[in-house]
Image: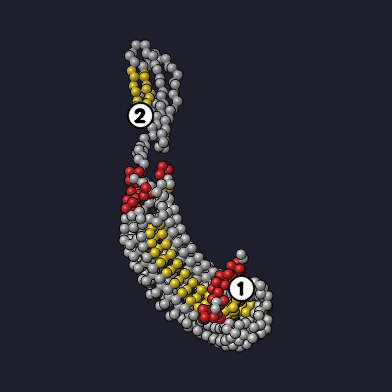
Amino acid sequence: MSRGEAFALLLWLLVKPSLCQPEECKDQCNRQMFSSSVTDIPRVLKPSTTEVYFLNSQIETIPKKAFFENPQLEKIEFIESNVASIEPGALEGLVNLKAVEITGNPLATIPAGVFKDLENLQMIVLKNNKLRNLEKGLFQGLKNVIEIQLHGNEIDQIEEGTFDELENLERLHLAKNNISSVSTDLFSKLAKLQTLRLYENQLTSVPEDIFHNLTNLKEVALSGNKLTELSPKLFPHKDKLVKLNLENNLLTTLPPQFFVDFPQLKTLTLQKNNLRTLPPVLFGTLPKLSSLSLSENNLSTLPKGLFSPLEKIKKLDLSKNHFVTMSAEYFEGLGGLTELKLENNKIHSLDADVFHELPSLTTLRLAHNDLRTLPGDTFQPLVKLTKLYLNNNPWQCDCNLVQLHSWIVSNSKILTSAAVCESPEALKGQEIKSLNEDQLICPTRPPTTASPTTTTVIATTTTISIPTTTPMTTVITTTKKATTALTTLPTTCVTTVPTTTLPTTTRTTTIPTTTLPTTTTQQL
């Protein structure tokens, strides 16, 4: 079964009541569905039909006045059919039409005038087609439309003034297209706009005044673009914004005080950027912010008290950055935080009191870091902790881990994933909680004693005189590094034997050797 057929079957089940008996179907008998066998749009539908669905059909063109004989229609959908073109006037005469959807078709263009005179139209869905250009006049006269979905096309050009007559539009979806730029005035007439989704386009910048007239914005989605910077004045009207998505761009920093005075902001995503540093004052009070993600950036440090204004935040994600240590001053003021994600950093140490400011924390993720040991009282301030992730760290299971081991054994239910020894070799691969305390030992090394270098230098000069009558006198002269023996007889009868000098001998240990000069023996 193809994807289209599966979808058709699902929708068939949803609209099945339209085939029931009149006394049973009540309000459900107003629907008709046509599937793959249909090649042309029926000219006349049942008089009671207000909703018509074409699912996986073979209709390639929606001709002019295609539904002219069915003015009662309120909803028309072409889902994953083969619609490649729509003629001007195709929807002419549908004065009661409230919603039209053309999704998953090879439709590349829609001429201006298709929606002409549809004064009651409230929703237009043209998603996942092949549209490339939006012409000025396409939405002319549609003063009651409150939602337009154009995501998943190939739009790379929007003519100036295209949206100007949509004075009651509240939701505009332009995501997943090829839009590389937007003009300052493109949305300037949409005073009632609440939701604007431009994610996954090719935007490299956003004009400073693009939201100047959008006083009712509640959601802005700019993720998945190529934005490198944001103007400090980008959001002049902050009082109603609830959700701001800036993830997956190329932002390297943010303007100071950029997130100040957003009283309704509940969700803020900044992950998957290139953020390296953040200004000391970035956030205001943000009393309703419940979630903040800064994951997948290049952060290695944070300003002291950066998050302190965020008293109501529940979830903070700092994973996949370049932190090597964590300081208690990072988490000042986060007394209500319940989940902290620090996994996939390079953390090898934590400040002794790093978690003292987080009494409400229930989930802590420290997996995939470079932790080898921690003090045993590291997690004691976390009295509400129910989930702790310590896996994929190179734990060194020796005497320095005794206290942490004791805590882990006592709180094993909190440890959600296995913390495994990386060293010593004898314990590698074993879970910390499975060890006995007497296995956590540090090798004893004998003290290293350095003997002084001994240098022996012997330089001997011997003179022997054989006397005839006088007894021999021997004089020995000794120095610290050289010894000289001298024997002298009276000179009345002297026989001199040639002097013999023994070679110098040097013995050296590991301490650098110093050779003293040889002392020459003199005759006494």
The residue type indicated by label 2 comes to Thr
Please report whichever mark, 1 or 2, sits nearer to the chain's N-terminal start. Answer: 1
Residue at image coords 50%, 65%: 272
Is residue 130 shown to the viewer in this render? no
- Is label 1 or label 2 in front? 1
Give the secondary structure at mark 1.
strand
Q: In the drawing, what numbered circle is on residue 479?
A: 2
Q: Quadrant of residue 443?
A: top left
Residue 161 in the image: above or below residue 10 = below
User: Is 39 or 108 nearer to us in this picture?
Assistant: 39
Q: Residue 217 in the image: state x and y as whole percent.
A: 48, 80
What amino acid is found at the position of numbered circle 1 in the picture? Leu
Q: Give the quadrant of the C terminus.
A: top left
Q: Residue at x 43, y 17 (%)?
A: 497
Residue 169: x %, y % from top left: 53, 83
- Judge by depth and name the residue closer to the eye, 101 or 388: 101
Q: From the top left corner, tell me how far across and down residue 413 is, in percent.
A: 35, 55
Which label belongs to residue 258?
none
Pointer 1 local density, CA inside 10 Å: few below 14, some 14–19, many at least 20: many
**Circle count:** 2
Quarter residue 279 falls in: bottom left
On screen, residue 246 above or below 138? above
Q: Which quadrant would residue 351 be assigned to in this image?
A: bottom left
Residue 362 appearing in the image? yes
Q: Which mark is residue 55?
A: 1
